Image (cartoon, grey):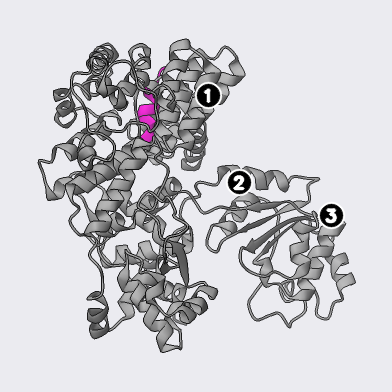
Amino acid sequence: MTTSEPQAGTLRLPWPFTGRDEELEVVRRSLAVGRPGIVISGPAGCGRTRLAMEAIRGTDCARVAGTPGTGDLPFAAFAHLLPEGVTLHRAVQLLSGTKQLLVDDAHLLDDASAALLHQLAVRGRTRLLVLVTDGARPPGAVSRLWTGELLPRLVLEPLPREETAHLVGAGAGGCLDPLTVNRLHRLCAGDLRLLRDLLDALLEQGSLTRDADTDELTWRGRVPVTPALRERAAAALARACPDEREILDRLAFAEPLSPPADTLDLRILERLEADGLLVVDADADADADIDADADPTVRLAHPLHGPVLRAEAGRLRARRLTGRRRSTASALRAEAAGLTRRIERTDVRTTPTPVGDWLVAEGEPVPPWYAAVRARFSRLRGELREAAAWAREGLAAAPQDHACRTELALAAAQSGETGTSVDLLAEHPATAAWPPAARGDLDTALQAVEESVAVIGGGSAPGPGPGDPHAAHDTYAAPEPHAAPAPHGPHAADPWSAYDAVRLGAPRHAVRVLPLDGCLARHARALARGDGPALDRVAAELEERGFLLFAAEAYAQAVRVHRDAGAARTARTRAVALARRCQGARTPALSGLVLGELTARQRQIVTLAAAGLSNRQIAERLTLSVRTVGNHLYGAYTRLGAGDRDALPWLLEQPA
């Protein structure tokens, strides 16, 4: 007999379970003794099965699964649990003694299996964990589980971008730069199986390169077309009608710009739209304010369809269709102007930016004026690593660009970094507070920011007005619209350097400078009064407007002034949750957070992990098993609000 061992390079180990802690707790509670169970639904590849397996780990649970093509076979899913030729009544009797049952792909069950599942739910003796894919049409007996209120239903959302970054970092064996993570997250649209397949292809082809400055893995250039990607794009590739395929190819080669709908055959567009292959949008300006009277535009429905269609086109076809692509220059300017208008409106919620994302994905040079706007927008959102990545894209084309250098330094300073790049900020009064703040010298930082606010209040020089195309180069040109004028000159319409005083805990001077009816001024007034509930309200407003870091800082400030211990704990929890989404933010306002209390053993292990010891080294030093060390670290991560070891050194520095 001949045997063969699998090659180590082809062995796929499971990715870490991440981003579903709350959902896992909900599922486990639903499977407790005396509970009926739960239905978990979500889009394909969202991680339903992995969540279910984590929930039943270590328990005695029977498993069945629906299978395509078995709809005519009675009890096909339960064949391994039931004798041949069994009736529904007998099947219910035989399975009533099963304490716990996992039913995967329940939307594929044959009618007899669906009826059996429904009867088990009616009896209530078996705790049921039922998994269903959104968009599929389950048998009526399955859908009645939740519509008939026999079982609660948990709808899974796609994994957030932050958790996607943890997954791909574990899969790639190193940290990926934020722009690469964004691209992977956008392409896979929440399908984790597709994400893993794409990442494996990038690793196999050597498409991930390590950045010499940041030591991060980056990906620029074409999408590798794997069998899984072709399968996902099969609906577009297999169109038999030549006219339909021609339109799909035209849309693929028009990216990142969407062509007007009136330039294409309307009847063909209707068929493709009905089949879910394209989306017709009202044309919108770069800040996503939709004009109902504008001409509609057309784009491909799935972000992977374009790359696959382009890869499958022959050379001559690709050359012909590429020649039709419009210049992106004006669209790029409009995109930057739209982002600037959003900053002026104190609203940095996520907005589509297809042109800039396309430039980065294709490895094209990014104009520094555009990169500075993107860096600023990301920084105000609290996405500090992403802001730094955009600034570096601009500096690659113009190494001495002042706006990009300033944004890179601000992102570094607000991440707690020090050095010559951060010291650049000391050259301008509006940013001079951040180098000492990064070093922990809060007295010097407050003195610098108060001097800056005093200059602004005195109206020493006017700043760029709203709509000025050069405003993107001024890091602090972002007035709120319709704000009441402050009493001290034209710089009162430039709130961001004054708002730094609020973030650093000195709101007294900023109150009289910031626009009176804006959320930044409300933050200043609430902090000056020491009003905890008002700080909570303004933090919620900042979060809604997309300012995640500012919201985390406001909640952290509320912790210190709340008189009610319960309100303080709630504010602390919200501050921690938001700070975790801010890509390593380390600002003075966050430094006083009590991020959770650890047991003595957890504190011991976390201290060693923060010092750089591996799990095995910690286990050997403390005479523990590696598994025990891992369990203690996992519990500590949860209580500290940390995602991995990289956050531990900072968290342990925080005063209790």
Query: Residue placed at 34% from the left, 19% from the top?
Result: 486
Quadrant of res 294? bottom left
Secondary structure mainly formed by the magenta segment: helix
Q: Do the residues labelled 3 and 1 touch (CB within 8 Å)?
A: no
The image position of residue 598, as x and y in percent, is: 51, 25
The image position of residue 555, as x and y in percent, is: 48, 24
- What separation in Å lies between label 2 and label 1 (alpha carbons)? 26 Å
Mark 2 Cα within 10 Å, few/some/many (few <14, many 20+)? some
Q: What element carries label 1?
A: helix
Query: What quarter of the picture does the C terminus occupy?
Result: top left
Q: Which of marks 3 and 1 is nearer the N terminus?
A: 3
Q: Earlier in the sequence, mark 2 or mark 1?
A: 2
Residue that carries the numbered disc 2 in the rendered image: 23
Magenta stretch holds residue 619: no
The answer to whether residue 597 shows anywhere in this view is no
Quadrant of res 372? top left
The nearer-to-camera label among 2 and 3 is 2
Query: Residue placed at 30% from the left, 42% from the top?
Result: 340
**Is 143 left, or right, of 97 in this rendering?**
left
Residue that carries the numbered disc 3 in the rendered image: 124
Magenta residues, as a range?
647-655
| Identity, as a three-letter code, of the amino acid under mark 1 | Asp
Establish if 391 lies above or below 440. below
The nearer-to-camera label among 2 and 1 is 1
The image position of residue 471, as x and y in percent, is: 23, 38
- What separation in Å lies between label 3 and label 1 (alpha carbons)? 44 Å
Residue that carries the numbered disc 1 in the rendered image: 536
- Label of residue 175 in the image: none
Q: Which of marks 2 and 3 is nearer the N terminus?
A: 2
Mark 1 Cα within 10 Å, few/some/many (few <14, many 20+)? many
Q: Is mark 3 on a helix, strand or loop?
A: loop
